[in-house]
Amino acid sequence: MIETISLKRLSAGGAAIGQLADGRTAFVDYGCPGDVAEVVIDTEKPRFVRGHVSRLVEASTLRQDPRCPAFGWGGCGGCQWQHLSIDVARAAKRDEVADAVTRIGKLDNADTLTREPLTTDVVYGYRNKIELEARLHKGRLELGFHRAGSNELVSPDECPLFSAPQKDLIRAISGALRYALGSTDFGLSRVALRHSSRTGAFEIALVSEPGTFPRSRVAQTLKSACPGATSIVRVLQKTPARGAGRRAPSPQFKGVEVLAGAGYWEEQLGNFTYKISAPSFFQVNTSAAELLVARVCEEIAADGSDRIADLYCGVGTFSLPLAAAAGSLVAVESSGPALRDLRRNVSDAGLCAEVIGGEVGRDSAGISSVDALVIDPPRAGLTSAARAEILRLSPARLVYVSCDPATLARDLAALTTTGYTLCCLQPVDLFPQTAHVECIATLEASR
């Protein structure tokens, strides 16, 4: 079914919103506020429909030409907003944060407290990491991104968001792996590429099931195709058999094999250098991450005598600058690889920190009260145990870094009813050309 729809605004998921003649709300991928578009309806529900733009009847003045030839419905699904002017996209991200905290968190002053996003001038070529899915199709290895609206792969020669160390990098790696692996995938599921324009480090991480693997041949072939590679590793993941539940089981990390080079990736953020192993998370936009870290440190306002805790600290993105500024720092992380990276990064920086390996709320009970607290939880937000731990630690100042406005809003609703006052919401545009937004929420004890 095709409908002609006038599009009015943007939704939190990135689609433009309009209305059908029967009153149902339409969420339209690749639409823009101000468009009049012919829309293919892909999914129908009693109260809403989802679709995508098939033809513009009247193009919005807010549109711009996307840089990537693979962008759009049926192309690469990694970006949602290359067709929007950057100012429109950033205004939408600010509004998404304010709306979520108002609507879900029930905080009436959210709009007033939400600042304009922190931004950099770099809106393409900002990513230090991309991941390619690997599949064997008719005896031929394919690497690529998920196609928009489908589970198929699209394989562009390059990604304009990625700070690639060489032209046609995706094509070069695809060809090298096809040659090295032949008609067998050896359990390969993903290829992660990390490149730092600051340190020159370039890592190729092959994610595969444990088992037989032509390590030497793969390493030699990749080094020949990508002479700038400083590290080539194999990340071993075992996927448990699917049980009776509806959700597919999560892969289990089994270890890392160094095939060539350093065995880690290195990035510089502010005054610190971080060594990061392939399984560990690190912010993908280095220049914008510097703004994020600087603002968190500014909100914490360490004075050299205070005790600060950094929960869900990862490899130490916030821990290092906080340890340098605070009287003492305690850092908590549950991921084994990230924990090892954290300890190495703290030591290499010549800093001191109390490092605790384990879950927030389960393994952090030995921490005494703190003056200030930084939390950067996963997209799912805080568990009930983590919220209880925050109340036990009773910091005078709490800085919450979130990658999901909806779960942030839910957690703020709980925190503001247990003795904390929301002071400000600071969005950060870490992901230009996409609908994703990071946000820093600062709270103070009101009791």
Image (cartoon, rainbow, N blue to C red):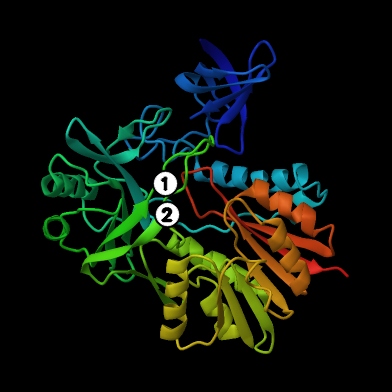
Q: What residue sits right under mark 1 in the picture?
A: 240
Q: Quadrant of residue 302?
A: bottom right
Which residue is at a point 49% across and 43% down the rendered structure image?
434
Residue 237 locus on image (x, y percent): 36, 54
Label 1: how many residues lie within 10 Å, few (<14), some (14-19) or many (20+)? Answer: few
Residue 117 locus on image (x, y percent): 60, 55
Label 2: how many residues lie within 10 Å, few (<14), some (14-19) or many (20+)? Answer: few
Say which quadrant the C terminus sits in. bottom right
Q: What residue sits right under mark 2 in the picture?
A: 252
Of the two numbered discs 2 and 1 in the rendering, the one whose residue sits closer to the viewer: 1
Number of numbered discs visible in the structure rendering:
2
Residue 55 locus on image (x, y percent): 44, 18
Q: Are marks 2 and 1 in contact (CB under 8 Å)?
A: yes
Left or right relative to 54: residue 224: left
Q: CA distance from mark 2 to mark 1?
A: 8 Å
Which residue is at a point 67% across and 74% down the rendered structure image?
300
Left or right relative to 251: residue 374: right
Earlier residue among tags 2 and 1: 1
Q: Quadrant of residue 387?
A: bottom right
Which residue is at a point 37% across and 27% down the rendered structure image?
74
